[in-house]
Amino acid sequence: MSSWLSFLPHQIPFRAASKAEKIADDRVTGWYLASAGDALQEGVASAREHLVVEAMAQIAGMLVFGESAAPGFLSAIDGVIFTDPVQSGDRVYLDVRLVAVLGRVSRFEGKASREGREIGSARFYLAAGEESVNA
Amino acid sequence: MADLSDLKRKLKELLIDRLKFEDMSPEDIGDDEPLFQGGLGLDSIDALEIVVMLETEFGLKIKNEASAREYFRSISSLAELVAERTQRATVEEGK
C-alpha cells in the first residue's frame, strides 16, 4: 500500500513522508528523509522536527482514510518531544500507532528513530471530513 | 469496587491530569456539570482523551460516538459507566 502517499493532497515539496507501509490495522511505518535541499526548512526553527511529525501524520492517514482521496486533516498535535535534532542526510524511521477512534477523529502516537535509536515522539489527531466518515 | 463518590473524585483527578487543567482541583468540577457544551467546554479531541483514559485506567472500550455522547455527559454519568462495567466484569469472572 505504499501508493497511499500518491493519494495525498500534499505532493512535493509538501509531502514529508517518503515511504509508508501498513504493518497492521492499527500500525503503519515509514520514512522521512532529510534533504539538504529541503525548501521547507529555511528560516524556520525546528523545521525538520515539525516535518517529521507532519510525515507521521501523512502516513497515519492510511489507517483511517484508506486509499481514497477522501478529505481529512491533521487536527491537533500534543506532547511532541525530540531528544536529538534532525539533520541533513538523516533517514528517520517512523512508527505510528492508531490509539483510538471516536466519530470522525482519530488519535495516534508516533515514534521517530534514527539508526535504531529513538529521537522523538508525538501524539497527534486526524479528523475526517464530512464526506469521508468510515470509522 | 470503590464507593461511587470516590470514583467520581478519581475521574475528576484523571481528567484534570490528562486534559492538563492547570489551577483546577476536583472541587471545581461539579458531579453533574456538563463536560462539553456550556460546561467544562471539552471538545472532540478531549473526548478521545477520555476514551483512552477509560481504556488505560479501567480497561473499558468505548467503540462508538453514540455511547460516548451518552456516557460523557458528566462526571456522574462517567462514574456510572465505570461502576456498571466493572461490576459486570466482576460478575462474569465469578461465573
Image: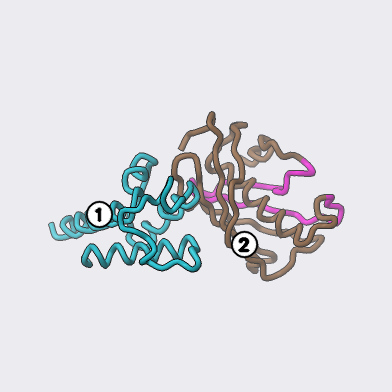
Which color mode does the image show? by chain
Give the alpha-carbon distance from disc 2 to disc 1, as whole Å.
Answer: 34 Å
Residue visible at 66% across and 35% down?
Answer: A7
Identity of the residue drawn at 22% across and 67% down: B2
Report how many numbered discs are placed on residues in the image: 2
Q: Position of residue A43 (x, y in %)?
A: 84, 57
* In the rendered image, the vertical position of residue A13 relative to residue A49, given as above or below: above
Q: Is residue A82 left or right of residue A33?
A: left
Residue at (19, 60) in percent of width and height: B90
Q: Which residues are magenta?
A: A12-39
Q: Are marks 2 and 1 on the same chain?
A: no
- Tag on residue A80? 2
Q: Is residue B65 above or below residue B4?
A: above
Instruction: Give coordinates of residue A6: x percent, y percent.
Output: 69, 36
Q: For mark 1, what is the residue?
A: B80
Rendered hue of chain B is cyan
- Residue A61 vs residue B46, the one in the foreground: B46
Give B76 or B33, whichever is nearer the viewer.
B33
Mark 2 surroundings within 10 Å by alpha-carbon count, few (fewer than 14), some (14 through 19), many (20 or more): some
Q: Amino acid type of disc 1?
A: Glu
